[in-house]
Amino acid sequence: MRAIILAAGEGKRLRPFTESMSKVMLPVANKPILGYVVDAVTGCGVEDIVMILGYGKERIMDYFGDGKEFGANIKYVFQEKQLGTGHALLQAKEEFEDEFIVLAGDNIIDSSLISPIITQDGLALLYITHDKPSKYGVVKVDDGLIKDICEKPKEDIGNLISTGICKFGRDISNDLKQHLSQGHNRLTSFVQLLLKNGKDIASVKGNGIWQDAVYPWDLLKINDTAIQNCSRSVAGKIEKGVELRGNVSVGGDSIVRSGSYIIGPVVIGEGCEIGPNVCIFPSTSIGSGVTIGAFSEIKNSILMNNVVVGSRSSVLQSVIGKGSEIGSNFTSATGDAYIKIDDSNDFHMVKDIGAFIGENCEIGSGVLIDPGKIIGKNCKISAQRRITENVKSEGIVV
């Protein structure tokens, strides 16, 4: 059995965090999203992995290498232009075996989700139930077979959605070429073609973890899911007067200074300096090389590598990109917000949300960011500013 992982896309709707790395490499509980896919596959005994790469391929290859460190044998295939998932799969046609599974590299999954499709004979598609099916490909199932799949239906036609995880065989090559020659390039429409061509596709229900991140605020949801498996582990130094409650992981060469109070699940990377008198609350991931100043509060947030947060700051329900430096008395206000994505008129109502700050930003002391605001990468914000609108990358607020 071989696993082919589609990991070529950028994830534009997750900007600014994907402006310098692909979606699959965004850290969740201090591990790239793609790492959870690899763990799920190898956890089912599948060690032979082909990754289809495009955007940000160098970072992915540097991290995973030949795969031995992850219990796998990883080979790389490249999609030079991101022309859809069907086109991506065709790039790996030389790697097709009699049986192989195809997975997206940008979903949080676990072994229990995919194990049923690995043992299923013949062509198969893995589906789950979902409370917001209109965002996905909705499948119709009858007598153990997939009968139809409809991408993002406007009408209510059911709550069974495709996970995009399929089991194929070497004999799909001609169907795939036909699919692309007809101007289609998505796996969803490829499944429709297989059905039209009279192929039986088994329906397999998944019961494990399956979560995707489409927008920046989704990172907090999947981080909350992933971090639940965090175990208590302290490799760094914990000063006297520190209270750790629940599952808290502290990396090597990190120090948590006196008076700090941490409630797990919380993950802290290597080489961090926390406190003194810092409070960190559940579902928080702190990368490596992070500094958090005295009397600050961090809750349900992701701080990527080498972030600096000044003293007496409050970071709640927020994501801060790597290398950003934030002055003292900073506040990410939380509340319900209509969030605007890029230059489109696409607004999303998100409840109880904080701020999203791209990488390598410089934010002065006393800055307040209103709920749901997105700050691009390499931005500079002067002290004592209140941010009430999104700030584009390279932006300056004086």
Image: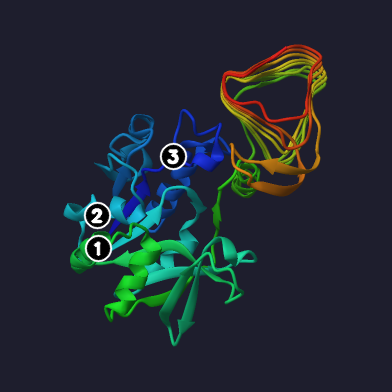
Q: Earlier in the sequence, mark 2 or mark 3?
A: 3
Name the residue at 38% across, 77% down: 202
Q: Position of residue 13 (x, y in %)?
A: 54, 42
Circle 1: residue type? Leu
User: Marks 1 and 2: in contact by CB < 8 Å?
Assistant: yes
Query: Which residue is under mark 2?
Result: 90
Q: Position of residue 108 (x, y in %)?
A: 52, 51
Percent from the top left, x then y, of residue 92? 23, 51
* Residue 55 lies in quadrant: top left
Determine which of the numbered discs, if any, sits on residue 10 in the image. Answer: 3
Residue 132's place in the image compared with 293, above or below, is below
Between discs 2 and 1, the one toward the N terminus: 2
Q: Disc 1 on helix, strand or loop?
A: helix
Q: Position of residue 163 (x, y in %)?
A: 47, 62
Q: Is residue 267 left or right of residue 293?
A: left
The one nearer the camera, 11 or 319, is 11
The crowd level at tag 3 (other Cα within 10 Å; few <14, some 14-19, many 20+) is many
At 70% from the left edge and 34% from the top edge, which residue is drawn? Answer: 318
Q: CA distance from mark 2 to mark 3?
A: 19 Å
Quarter of the figure with the N terminus: bottom left
Q: Which residue is mark 1?
A: 176
Q: Say if 176 sits above or below 315 in the image.
A: below
Task: Determine the image quadrant of residue 397.
Answer: top right
Please tell me which residue is depicted at 62% across the width and 40% down the height of the picture.
341
Return the disc, 3 or 1, that comes first in the chain's sequence.
3
Instruction: Please name the amino acid that badge 3 sits on.
Output: Glu
Q: Give whichever of 356, 281 is nearer the camera.
A: 356
**In the displayed structure, does residue 186 sit left or right of residue 174?**
right
SS at badge 2:
helix
Residue 253 can be seen, yes or no: no
